Image: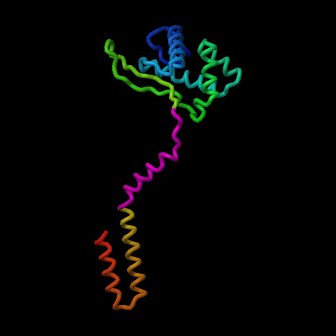
Amino acid sequence: MRHNYKGRKLGTDFSHTKAMKKSLVNALFLNDRIKTVESRAKEIRPDVDKIITWAKRGDLHARRLAIAALGDKELVREIFEKVEQGMFQDRQGGYTRIMKLGPRKGDNAPMVIMELVTEPVKKKDEEKPAAKKAAKKVAPKKVEKAEEAVEAEAVETKAEEAPVENVEAVEAEVVEKEKAE
């Protein structure tokens, strides 16, 4: 029985799964991109995020935890130096990207490319104008109704201000403006 063993088994026993995950994480940090099976990529994603979070902390305890997880002091030193230089400074998580490639030819296993995300984070303020544009496209119907109400009020105020004989002329001007639009 598999009591207290979390995660996918990946078709092997626990020690082999653990070694495979450690090897994949090492390969990802060395090459910044690896090609692997989708289930393996999804399984190592939390480990990669955890190591980068430790590197962002940057203290001795975090460094020792990373060395224990990766087993390579030089690789840990490189990761910590990259993070100190500001590689993942503005990113609050989501340090990896998984892109699907399709099935493998031999056994139809779903293949993916997993890579470290190095682009800066786009702020949500940049996304809001797109939402406003979509809202503007929907809004014209409501705006037209509002404009008609405003025009009706304008006609009434002009009619109240103008003498009785000019009321018909003011209404005719408003109708002509509506036709022009």
Residue under the point 40% across and 52% down:
134
Q: Quadrant of residue 177?
A: bottom left
Left or right: residue 161 versus residue 64 is left
Q: Position of residue 131 (x, y in %)?
A: 44, 50
Residue under the point 41% across and 73% down:
150
Q: Is residue 91 above or below residue 171?
A: above
The answer to if 26 sits in the magenta stretch is no
Q: Is residue 168 above or below residue 76?
A: below
Q: Position of residue 110 (x, y in %)?
A: 37, 20
Between 29 and 159, the one nearer to me in the picture: 29
Residue under the point 46% across and 9% down:
12
Between 69 and 83, the one nearer to me in the picture: 83
The answer to if 128 sits in the magenta stretch is yes
Between 111 and 33, the one nearer to me in the picture: 33
Q: Position of residue 122 (x, y in %)?
A: 51, 40
Instruction: Tell me where the magenta segment starts and ends, as one range.
Output: 119-140
